[in-house]
Amino acid sequence: MDEKARSLLLQNRTALVRDIRTAYIMDHMISDQVITPEEEARVKAQHTQVDKANFLINLILGKGKQAYVSFYNALLHEGYKDLALLLKEAANAEHSDSTKSSSNGITSYVQTVLCEGAVPQRPVVFVTRPKLVTKIQQSLYKLNVESGWVTVYGMAGCGKSVLAAEVLRDHKILTECFPGGVHWVSVGKQDKSGLLMKLQNLCTRLDQEAKYSQRPPLNAEEARERLRLMVNRMYPRCLIVLDDVWDSWVLKAFDIQCRVLITSRDKSVTDSLSGFKEAVRVDSELEHSKGLEILSRFLSLKAEELPSQAHSIIKVSKGSPLVVSLIGALLREFPTRWDFYLTQLKRKQFKRIRKSSSYDYEALDEAMSISVDNLKEDFREYYNDFSIIEKDVKLPTQVLCILWDMEREDVEDMMQEFVNKSLIYCDRNGKSFSYYLHDLQLDYLTERNRDRLTVLHAKLVDQYKKHYSSKLPTVEQEDCVYWYHYLAYHMAKANLHQDLCSLLFSLNWLKAKSELFGTSHLIHEFVQYRNILDNQNAKAREHFQEFIAVNGHLLGLNPDISIVQLGLGQAEDSEVYKQAILQAKEELKSGVLYVNWINKQRMKNLPTLVVRPHKDAVFHACFSPDGRKFASCGADKTLQVFRSETGEKLLELEAHDDEVLCCAFSADEKLLATCSADRKVKIWNAKTGKPIRVYEEHTEQVNCCQFTNGLSAPLLATCSNDCFIMLWDSETEYSRNTLIGHTGAVYHCRYSPDDRYLASSSMDGSLKIWDVESANEEKSIEVAKLFENEDESQPEVLLKCCAWSNDGSRIMVTTRNFLCIFDSTSCDLLSQLKACHQILYCDFCTTNQIVALALSHYVVQLWDIDSSTKIADFNAHLSWVHCVKFSPKSSSFLTSSDDQTVKLWETSNVSKPSATNLKREFDVSFNGEETLVLATSKDDCILLINGMTGETLSQINTQDKCVTCCCLTNDYQLAAIGDRDGKVKVIDVSRGEILCKLDGHSATVQHCQFTADGKHLVSSSDDSTIRVWSLASGESLELRGHKEPVKFFKILQESQVFSWSFDGTVKVWDLITGKLRKEFICHSETVLSCDISPDSTKFSTASADKSAKIWSLDMSTLLHELNGHQSCVRCCRFSWDNKYLATGDDNGKIMIWSVQNGELLKQCCDISVNNENSLHDGWVTDLHFSPNSKLIVSSGANVKWWDVDTGACKQTFYTVGTNLKSIHLCPTFRTFVTIDNLGILYVLKLIE
């Protein structure tokens, strides 16, 4: 073995023996015949893993070069790429030769590639640094065989970007390593929206022919995926250069298995990334000869012709490239001022700057002063305007055009003067320029103009208001990002408090800004400027901040949503509503449609923050110990971390290969744990997202993970479907203890407040308490025995969740819809709370005796366990609530749900709902301006409600277990209800009395309706029959003929009943005799909906067979079969002029057909950019034409209004809940009534 190989093995022995597992390594080496089976046995005979590794390395040291190469290749094959890299130099001696810098120079090919890739040109004054160039090129050559990251790092102003560009001016490296080209991206200090713009620009540059999309990506995830496709398919083996990267999270967007060159001030910027990584350091000081070369080039002299003062300038400036360039630029203007500038550098003091600056570069501060003082007076004033720019912010040219009221060409000419004097840096993005200052330059300017900063901020704001007096900046304008990000900051700094309020209390501004940055930045501004806003109008600040926090996820979901319509959904005393109604009335002039929620009251139980981070169900969410962050995980396999105050996303990880079921912070906040259906447990660095441990000892899905509560060494507990509980120390590779005792899947575990005990709840019906130190079972509570005398039809006793009281004296567990509370010492049952639905999760408050429950049907409840009193009960989500977790101080709590949202609630602001929750079976009577709604509450009370005021006019308790339908007479004196047992009851509404009970159906009553004269009641049932009841005698006439359930019917003129059924048929009956007049075999599958044309000559059918049909009612013939839907056609409706038929399906599509010839005329489209099928976000359940046949209203996940001629959506009303079953409307198409799945009644009226 040669000396180089031996030396590398010895130097890296510590790292090798610590990490490698010898068994796998030796398999490869035996295959290569470099060690024998006998030698393998000797290695395995060693006692510890470290001893085995040491023995193996000693064996290799005694062998030749072939053994070294075999060992190196084994490391590569077994995934120890970082260790193999330590040995690579000796394993592949030829590699160093292949990485020598090319001498081909800058060919035309190089020029073309760099120009197309937007690589910056050489500075006007440029000196070579061949050693650094060669070193960087050697690192880049290593990307020839695999993707990875090369980082060029060093202090600001040391020339990193110039060097990165220079290494690419080489024909050989471009052709051999990067035949796919080079693509330069100037990153800088970015927030999420700024990064998205960078990604959008790069995608547009790479896809100039729009092969992959006609629009830019709308979020970082979409941009990353599109970038991955384009790089792999269009630009394989290309190099992406990320210039001036500040934050490691930015690199996640480029982690697409490609080759990346980075310039950064931070060497550790790639630490959280996987794959090959190498870093090259750039010194902050130039060699003396290079400093002289810079000065000589500025003055067009040879280095030996420079005066002696040049050497002194290099020495005094400490060889800083930036300082030397600044002085050189000045000397080019005044070449005789050597002594003057040297004296200035030596003598000039800037104490105030040194105090305020975080940098220790005295010479640079001095050079700054000299450079600025030598500007012409008018130029100096323009340069002073940069004093108010935030650090690391690049100003688009257009912002300066507005600030200075100049033409673009004049601004660019002036800025070029600053660039030439090294006072400003310039970035070019296509045809536009952006300008920025070095931090030190900005520090100097800020201190220099400290007394004028307020005036300078006001100047910028005034110029903005002058330019955008009648409109807002649009996304297409290059300056829009700057204004939306920083205008509020400038107003606050200028003490323009009224202007700041006008800005942040503007619906149009909020909508435009949320489209660019999301809502977290808006919430941040409301928090940051709260004192200013409250001094002006505290009520408005509260209303607008609440509005953004609650509705922000909708604005982010669909950029086409109307913020004015959302504002109209606020309470009438809200400042948001007041602005929305004024704006709506103004926009009516231009034909915009808006609706008002007439019966709304101030909504109680509103969250303080809503985020929709996941693309699927969110199974768990938890606070960090300080409450400033929260984490969430779910079915989309990701773990995400957010700032609690604003909802800003701090971290997102592709955490597991299957659903992530739970997550937990350690008490010191340094660690985050996750567990998954993939049977793995993982521990992550909570700040960087870097994986620390991966445990794979569980054999089934892992349901829960929980860290100890104390700040001592964190101990993680996990429980699994394999019936085991395991304890893990993050410092070790294997579990510390396995707790064995359960005989069924263990769903949940929780440490006691003092960490002495661990509680676990299981499918076996037991709640166990374990001693953490000894890992022994202390107690077992057989909760299942509490329910052993119940009916066998009851569900199995599964213990879903457990929790300790804050003092550890009580322990509670959930099963079915019960919360059982036990004494933790005696194990006696103390109390039992019963909820309305299955309890999926519980958590105990840390400051008082309150427990929070997450229920399967939308609901969250808060109970005082001392008094067994329910103190809050509200619909928190649109689907099952999987988790509820209190903050450390219990002032707030989190909930997560199947509806993909995480919500943050103030504990003191939730209560029992004041409004009655209704079922979605209802009837409506419109009488002039009066709207009466007959509906059933969730507890089966019959309510007659004044729709305009929300007042309950009559309430009747029928004591029915499940009311399934209801109806009113035309004079709304009588009501009828049907129930699940087949019973029908007729009620006197005014007196609240049941007049008669009609017994005849043998299964659920699906629909009922009074005849026009109020003398008869018709009902249909799942027993396949229709009954016509005489209200006078109580007798019924049975219409039997359908073979499957009859869900609906219509009463026609001439005493006829028109019915349809799951059997695919439509029948027409004589209401008087009960005889079947006509029968139509319409579809091979269920008929879901029918409609009669206004002229009564035709009817339509819609079916689960994905088709609709138009029939002649008179001729009993099929006129048109309408094919085009891709899913069940759920509803259909004729227009009032008999020209059109509209159909709606389960994919959310609405199609408009010609009744005359069956031709498809229009598809109604409201496709959001984030969801290509987002028409109704689900089924279209009902639709109606306006009397003039110009508009359609439809119900589904929400209520939408459509333009018949264009198919465009004119407006959407977003209900609090979703899944609207039907919508009723008045004859004039002005008032609309519906009920959502949360039981909220909506009476909507067009604004006129």
Image (cartoon, grey):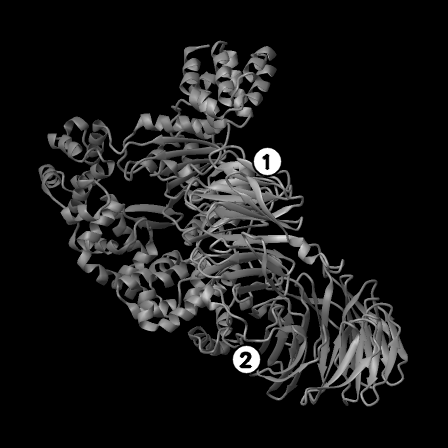
Above or below: residue 1081 compared with residue 958: above
Answer left or right for 786 relative to 1109.
left
Single out the mark in the foreground, 1 or 2: 1
Q: Nearer the viewer, residue 1050 or 1016?
A: 1016
Q: Nearer the viewer, residue 24 or 1053?
A: 24
* Residue displayed at 14% across by 38% down: 335
Q: Nearer the viewer, residue 916 or 1228?
A: 916
Amino acid type indicated by mark 1: Glu
Q: Secondary structure at mark 2?
A: loop
The Cα–Cα distance between marks 1 and 2, rounded to whole angstroms, is: 59 Å
Q: Which residue is mark 2?
A: 598
Above or below: residue 455 compared with residue 122: below
**Image position, residue 690 (x, y; %):** 46, 39
Q: Which mark is residue 697?
A: 1
**Alpha-carbon neighbours of circle 1 within 10 Å: few (<14), some, or many (≥20)?**
few
Q: Secondary structure at mark 1?
A: loop
* Residue displayed at 48% across by 9% down: 62
**Image position, residue 73 (x, y; %):** 53, 20
Above or below: residue 83 compared with residue 869: above
Amino acid type indicated by mark 2: Ile
Q: Which mark is residue 919?
A: none
**Image position, residue 1015 (x, y; %):** 79, 89
**Image position, residue 619 (x, y; %):** 57, 52
